[in-house]
Structures are given as C-alpha cells and as structure tokens.
Amino acid sequence: MERFDPQKYTDDETERITLRVSHKVKEDLARLAQQQNLSLNKLLIRCINYALNNMKEDK
C-alpha cells in the first residue's frame, strides 16, 4: 500500500457529521493538520477517503 499523502487527496461535496475521538487522537490529528497546512476537517476527510480507497475487499 502506498504511503498516505494528505496533499494528494481532494475534497468533494461535504455533509456534516459528528465524530468522537480520544483527546490524544484529536491532538495528533491537529498537529498533523498544522504540519500539512490543512484544516483538521480537510485532513479527516482526506484520511477517510484514503482508507476507503485502500481497503482490501473480501473475496
């Protein structure tokens, strides 16, 4: 699997959801978002898109 690059993924039309994560996960994501010059929301969308695009399908 290729390494995740947040800058490579684009944002499509969005819809609002609520997501609960631990404080540590939120802090880690916020730090990564800042390093990538992205909003936390955009980073989360790109992470989710990457995960969905790289899931192995059951045979």
Image: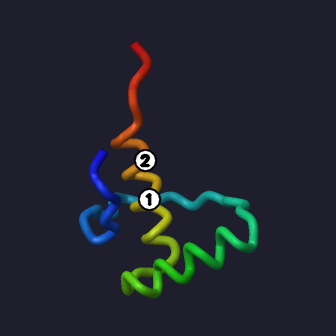
Residue at image coords 46%, 87%: 34
Please name whichever residue, 12 or 19, is drawn nearer the observer in this view of the structure: 19
Q: Residues within 10 Å of mark 2 (few under 14, many from 20)?
A: few
Residue at image coords 50%, 72%: 41
Please name whichever residue, 39 or 51, is drawn nearer the observer in this view of the structure: 51
Residue 47 is labelled as 1
Residue farthest toward the left in the current orientation of the protein: 8
- Asked which quadrant contains residue 35, the reply is bottom left
The image position of residue 22, as x and y in percent, is 75, 66
Scheme of colours in the image: rainbow
Q: Residues within 10 Å of mark 1 (few under 14, many from 20)?
A: some
Is residue 30 left or right of 24 when viewed as pictured?
left
Q: Amino acid at mark 1?
A: Cys
Residue at image coords 38%, 86%: 37
Q: Quadrant of the N terminus?
A: top left
The residues bearing labels 1 and 2 have C-alpha atoms spaced at a distance of 6 Å
The image position of residue 38, as x and y in percent, is 40, 81
The image position of residue 36, as x and y in percent, is 37, 81
Disc 2 designates what residue?
51
- Asked which quadrant contains residue 43, the reply is bottom left
Tag 1–tag 2 contact (CB < 8 Å): yes
Please name whichever residue, 37 or 25, is drawn nearer the observer in this view of the structure: 25
Is residue 57 left or right of 30 when viewed as pictured?
left
